């Protein structure tokens, strides 16, 4: 009977991740970049900028890890370039993770109820659903990490699993930047907590390590042969935040001697940036982030919704109560360690707490939540209607906030209106020689390339990247007849006669010859198209 429970959990989890992924949420620029580069690889064996079969893709000068692009190429080959195709690797990773978490806990703890509860909570997890419904590299990396952990424990019975574990961890490094920190830390933890197992099978462990290093060599060469090593750190790294450094100068200035020993000893980069890191790390465990409001970045959140359900706070606290009371550290030690290190990649950036970079945290926290659920349910089974009511209320509220409110309250979280804009221009403006488009919304050029299915070989020859902005990102200002720029109407209107000018409601004056308006889901104007 319990096998049918697992099947139902996977079916419902799949439905939550697959429903309307072809249209909701709207495709964002990062997703479009992954999809268009997969299309470019298929057509030319080069990325959008002409780099042949790269390990890192130079989109926006962001140097994205390439595994997701290559996973997308078979789908693009079979079904063409469209929104749901680009999202399928992420959806697939989310669904498989539900099953893997079940297998991991069942094999490790020998408790069917615990395993089912964990897969159930992950299947309905707001945190996991959100990042399983799009082209998020972090979700693929999380699946690879879970499989790496699962395989490591399986290696205690069959040594071949060492190869699978190490291969999976190494491939996670090809999938997502944050995995390059968390995966080595997790592997070290696995080795330490299972040192007896490793000692007994050291030859197999060592041979698998050599195999993993061979697989790692291309990535290592890529990291040290270009800008991929520093691009993300330059853009969002903790040391890119001038705040702690400014605070150093402010604090030293409050001393009588600015260059004195005391001022330098207590007010310096290691201290101030170290405190910033600790603050960032701790923020990922705050109740506001986990249960109330979630990530500050709109693309990563649902209105008035935390990363977990509010009632899970009780389950998590209960789990630690039982673990400490019954002294089960040996059984849960590695997962406590995982929970503690999970936010480290996010804490090393100035955007914190960050649900996407800390996505791997959803696995250990779901494990503890499900353990608390199982123990409390056994103690209070006669009140099962309360458990059911809490869940139904929680999932219903989450789904309402996701489907009815997110796009209306966060219209800028994804590129809403862009598909309609490109479709209109492609049909109605074929004879227009020049189209000027606002760059108010994130990287509009890549959305145009994606929806137009613009020939990659042609784009590679005719475009150039702009200079980096203060966050280290670049863009493309023009290709073919499309020009992307800030719309100052009084300047743009006389400079581009006979063109179409597309701007936001605030950029286009009321007296302009507006021929078309495109709206956000909220009813606000996204674009106004002017015949000049």
Image: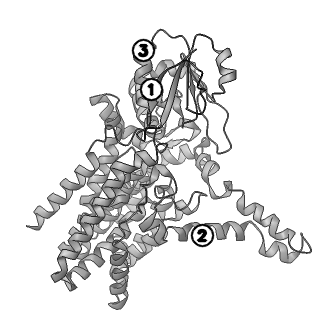
Q: Would you name the residue on which mark 2 appears?
A: 279
Circle 1 packing at 10 Å, graded few (<14), some (14-19), many (20+), is: many
Residue 206 is situated, as x and y percent measured from the top left of the image, at 40, 63
Circle 2 packing at 10 Å, graded few (<14), some (14-19), many (20+), is: some
Observer-nearest of 283 and 511? 511
Q: Would you name the residue on which mark 1 appears?
A: 421
Observer-nearest of 28 and 63? 28
Residue 37 location, quadrant: top left
Per the image, label 2 sits on a secondary structure element best described as: helix
Observer-nearest of 219 and 59? 59
Which comes before the other along the chain, label 2 or label 1?
2
Cα–Cα gap, marks 1 and 3: 10 Å
Compared across the picture, whether 278 is left or right of 414 comes to: right
Cα–Cα gap, marks 2 and 1: 42 Å
The quarter in which the C terminus is drawn is top right
Q: Is residue 465 above or below residue 112?
A: above
Task: Identify which residue is drawn at 68% across, 44% down.
Answer: 470
Mark closer to the observer (2, 3): 3
Cα–Cα gap, marks 2 and 3: 53 Å
Per the image, label 1 sits on a secondary structure element best described as: helix
């Amino acid at each position: 009977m319990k096998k049918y429970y697992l099947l139902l959990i996977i079916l419902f989890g799949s439905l939550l991740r697959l429903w309307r992924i072809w249209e909701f949420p709207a495709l964002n620029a990062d997703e479009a970049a992954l999809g268009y580069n997969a299309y470019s690889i298929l057509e030319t064996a080069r990325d959008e900028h002409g780099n042949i079969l790269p390990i890192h893709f130079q989109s926006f000068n962001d140097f994205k890890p390439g595994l997701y692009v290559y996973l997308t190429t078979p789908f693009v080959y079979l079904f063409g370039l469209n929104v749901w195709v680009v999202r399928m690797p992420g959806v697939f990773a989310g669904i498989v993770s539900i099953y893997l978490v079940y297998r991991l806990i069942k094999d490790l703890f020998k408790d069917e109820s615990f395993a089912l509860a964990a897969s159930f909570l992950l299947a309905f997890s707001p945190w996991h659903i959100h990042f399983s419904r799009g082209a998020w590299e972090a979700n693929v990396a999380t699946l690879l990490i879970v499989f790496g952990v699962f395989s490591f424990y399986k290696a205690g019975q069959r040594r071949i699993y060492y190869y699978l574990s190490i291969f999976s961890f190494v491939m996670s490094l090809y999938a997502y930047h944050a995995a390059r920190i968390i995966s080595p830390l997790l592997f070290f933890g696995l080795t330490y907590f299972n040192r007896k197992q490793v000692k007994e099978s050291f030859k197999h462990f060592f041979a698998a390590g050599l195999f993993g290093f061979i697989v790692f060599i291309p990535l290592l060469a890529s990291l040290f042969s270009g800008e991929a090593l520093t691009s993300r750190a330059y853009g969002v790294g903790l040391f890119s935040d001038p705040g702690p450094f400014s605070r150093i100068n402010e604090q030293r200035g409050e001393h009588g001697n600015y260059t004195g020993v005391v001022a330098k000893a207590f007010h310096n980069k290691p201290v101030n940036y170290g405190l910033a890191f600790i603050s960032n790390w701790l923020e990922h465990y705050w109740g506001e982030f986990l249960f109330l409001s979630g990530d500050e970045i709109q693309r990563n959140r649902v209105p008035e919704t935390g990363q977990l359900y509010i009632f899970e706070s009780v389950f998590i606290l209960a789990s630690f109560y039982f673990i400490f009371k019954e002294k089960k550290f040996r059984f849960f030690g590695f997962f406590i360690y995982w929970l503690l290190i999970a936010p480290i990649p996010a804490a090393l950036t100035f955007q914190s707490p960050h649900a996407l970079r800390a996505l791997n945290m959803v696995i250990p926290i779901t494990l503890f939540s499900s353990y608390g659920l199982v123990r409390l349910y056994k103690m209070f089974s006669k009140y099962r209607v309360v458990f059911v009511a809490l869940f139904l209320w929680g999932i219903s509220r989450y789904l309402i906030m996701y489907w009815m409110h997110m796009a209306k309250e966060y219209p800028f979280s994804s590129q809403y209106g862009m598909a309609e804009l490109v479709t209109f221009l492609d049909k109605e403006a074929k004879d227009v020689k020049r189209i000027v488009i606002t760059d108010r919304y994130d990287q509009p050029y890549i959305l145009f390339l994606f929806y137009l299915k613009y020939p990659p070989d042609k784009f590679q020859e005719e475009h150039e990247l702009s200079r980096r902005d203060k966050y280290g990102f670049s863009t493309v200002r023009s290709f073919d007849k499309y020009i992307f720029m800030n719309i100052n109407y009084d300047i743009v209107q006389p400079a581009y006669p006979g063109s179409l000018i597309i701007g936001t409601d605030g950029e286009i004056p009321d007296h302009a010859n507006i021929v078309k308006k495109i709206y956000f889901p909220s009813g606000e104007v996204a674009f106004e198209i002017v015949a000049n």
